[in-house]
Image (cartoon, helix red, strand yellow):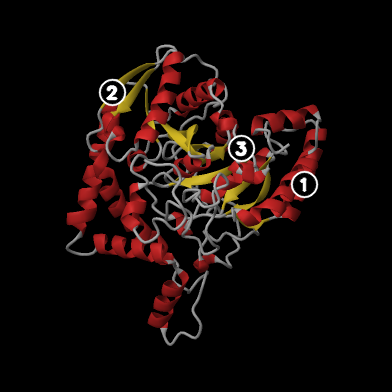
Amino acid sequence: MHNKTIAELAKGLADGDFSSVELTRHFLGRIDALDSQYNSFITVTPEQALAQAKAADETRASGHAKALTGVPMAHKDIFCTNGVLTTCASKMLANFVAPYDATVVSNFNHAGMVSLGKTNMDEFAMGSSNENSYFGAVKNPWDLKAVPGGSSGGSAAAVAARLAPGATGTDTGGSIRQPAAFCGITGLKPTYGRVSRWGMVAYASSLDQGGPMARTAEDCALMLNEMAGFDPKDSTSLKKSVPDYTEGLDQPLSGLRIGLPKEYFGKELSAEMSDAIMASVKEFEKLGATIQEISLPNTMLAIPSYYIIAPAEASSNLSRFDGVRYGYRCENPENLEDLYKRSRGEGFGKEVQRRILVGTYALSEGYYDAYYRKAQRIRRLIQQDFLNAFNEVDLIMGPTTPTPAFDLGSNSDDPVQMYMEDIYTLAVNLAGLPGISVPAGQINGRPVGLQILAGHFKESQLLNAAHQFQKATNWHQLAPSSGE
């Protein structure tokens, strides 16, 4: 059963081939037997999962089942879950049990899906390798010596290893798409404001966006149907009608205009990666699309502007973790100042501390205009580059990452090199655009991801293109041998 997609599992449940309880026990058994080698879960919730599965079977028997009723999934441990640990993979929140559900979690509960547990991640979503976790690094199911990507690496690894058919992720600068690429699955970052951020612990509020991670574009469409929508509890949520994202999956691609940014095929991209991406682009040509070169001239400014804006917002958002109200508190503080300093110094990991310091510096008196304001101006230029490009083409394609998954520990002492792994994904968040990564090849046994971008609220077009590509190729069907 674990080799079936979400769509196939939903059909199996509807046809009575198996029950949700049987399905849930199967996946819980795989987690118990296999996850010790991946470390993809922080918390597994077997009792809750089986209770939800039993309720789903009763709902189906009564004739009131929805499309995904009874299908298991997992949540990135950044989404608040009522009565279950929500740690953000940090010592700071290692004992925090959320008293409510995030809107995304509530939506999936309402759909009747079964939560298997909470997946590992980079601490407070800060990282590109899932090595910045208080609970230990996650390993890539395709090669246990490799990283799974970050920050949603636990979700990506769990789906790739067939421990869960789908999972939630969050994307601040590529944290859904990059791990999806490294782990050979499909990951969608929706338009900013399309999915509620309420109950999703904030990293950088103007950039964060939740999205689905699964094996196929069709599965992501099914999940996005439940995730998307206006939420009055989220001030960044946009009041816009939600289409059925599965309806347009089978539209032909004849006449589709695809742009290839010349900046995405520079010296940062290896020849092997370039060949794999161009082979995928040729598949779209066979499907009737036309290809043309375009330019996104401010691409190289995405990294410096992002690493001013995101840490600045993180500095503000993470100020609430002070040892006073909830979360980690140092032992025997001498006074309030000592409580603040030691609680934060002991509770936050090195990467989180680094970004808080950078952000605080950028927002400090005398540096705000020189750094933060200038970064916001560059952000506007980057957004305009995309708007100009979408006047010429329907979709933009290129690599999701400059390399396949790198080895664990290889970039740990070089944060700048680690930041370069996000060179093709950061600009998308700065512009608030939707993007998807789909499996598009392998290099030395490690997956390659093709990134597809569209205009604001064009998720249906993205999913249609990705689905048609997956009907013509089989990269998304491959499974790592470590989970057999």
> Vertically, is 448 above or below 30?
above
Residue 103 can be seen in this image: no
| Mark closer to the observer (2, 1) | 2
Q: Identify residue for label 3.
A: 479
Residue 282 can be seen in this image: yes
What residue is at 43 percent from the left and 27 percent from the top? 458
Residue type at mark 3? Ala
Q: Identify residue for label 2.
A: 293
> Vertically, is 50 above or below 247?
below
Task: State which quadrant residue 104 falls in.
Answer: top right
Where is residue 70? Give x, y as percent. 73, 39
Residue type at mark 1? Arg
Where is residue 383? Give x, y as percent. 28, 36
Estimate the spatial distance between the alpha carbons at disc 3 and disc 2, rounded to whole Å: 33 Å
Q: Earlier in the sequence, mark 3 or mark 1?
A: 1
Where is residue 290? Give x, y as percent. 36, 15
Q: Nearer the viewer, residue 320 or 467?
A: 467
Task: Assess disc 2: are there few (<14), some (14-19) or many (≥20) residues with their C-alpha within 10 Å of its C-alpha.
Answer: few
Estimate the spatial distance between the alpha carbons at disc 2 and disc 1, rounded to whole Å: 50 Å
Q: How many numbered marks, from 0 up?
A: 3
Q: Tell me the element at label 1.
A: helix
What residue is at 41 percent from the left and 73 percent from the top? 345
Q: Quadrant of the N terminus?
A: top right
Left or right of 333 on screen, residue 250: right
